[in-house]
Image (tube, grey):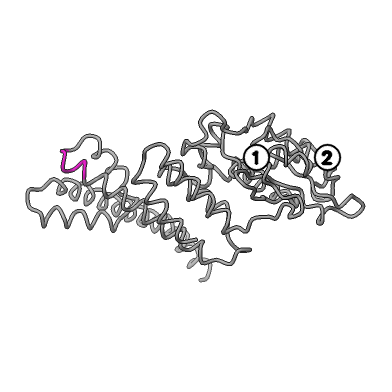
Amino acid sequence: MRRLHLRMVLWGLPLLLASVFCLASADEKDVDARVRQWITDLGHRRFVIRQTAYEHLVKLGKPAFPQLEQIAKTGTPEQRYRAREIIRFVHWRTLHSGLVALSRQKDEQLDLEEGMWLISLIVDPQVQREPLQRQLDQMAKDVRARLGKQVDPARAEPEVVIDALVAVLKDKYQLAGAHSNYDHPDNSSLDRVLSKKKGLPIVLSHIAVSVANRLKLPIVGCPLPGRYMIKYDGARAPDGFPKDDIIIDPFGDWKILTQEGILEVIPRFDPESGLVPSSRHEVISRMLRNLAADFEATGQQEKAAETMKLLLLF
């Protein structure tokens, strides 16, 4: 009897799955139809109908973006204007809620990579987080491969690990400082820096920190007047190795510097204070401040003001 019951269940399972799939497909078609109607209504002569459609599309959010982006290019002037406004509003609502959540986290729990992705969204709303993570994962794999299968990066000689990290980021991926167009907003976006290979000191530094974290290396970002660098924290070096810090300047061709060398680059640097790592909240705050300044320098006043509002969260 149990076997018969099991057979009946197994025979019926494909039909059940097919029914679920059909319902899901029907729901998707229904949503698409409603979105099309709401978008049509964005150009309606009656304000109440236009406004109702606007509110529905704002509530639905990103699932409506493909059709909204199309109508923003091909619709009537009223439809184009309202479609762009909806995309902009939903985009900034997503950014704001994401950064609010980060700002409320304890510093040691704050996900810096999520923060860098959210900042990238300010420059380009289409950026997806997963491809960025995959690129950073691959960089870490390349560093590990360069060290050799038998070497545990977390237990390796600090100088050897630094050489491998710099070789991968500088030589293989050709990441470098954006000297010729320093104030361009792209230089503050993790996505654009990874694709264009040029960036601000803090973004280059935290690409290195993100890769190092995957390898359990004690590399941290350190703020300086008008600059940002990374250091291998000698206090956390493996047993048997010197406990000296190793300072790297990603913006300055990934050179390894002494404290005297830092003074040549940054005369205002105080060697007695040393290089103190940034808190994670400070990193996000500084990146947002940089991006707001970039927008200001390139004449994008509205985006500069909106970015400054996000900065106030930190």
Above or below, comparing residue 38 to residue 188 in the picture: below
* Residue located at (10% from left, 48% from top): 44
**Which residue is disc 1 drawn over?**
138
Distance of label 1 from label 2 (alpha carbons): 19 Å
Query: What is the x, y in percent for residue 80?
Result: 21, 41
Magenta-highlighted residues: 76-81
Q: Is residue 78 left or right of residue 32?
A: left
> In the visual, does 73 lie left or right of 240?
left
Q: Amino acid at mark 2?
A: Val
Magenta stretch: dominant secondary structure: helix
Q: Position of residue 2 (x, y in %)?
A: 52, 70
Looking at the rendered structure, the kind of residue marked 1 is Gln
Q: Is residue 305 left or right of residue 82?
A: right
Q: Secondary structure at mark 2?
A: helix
Camera-nearest label, 1 or 2: 2
Task: Check residue 278 for magenta coloring.
Answer: no
Q: Which residue is mark 2?
A: 160
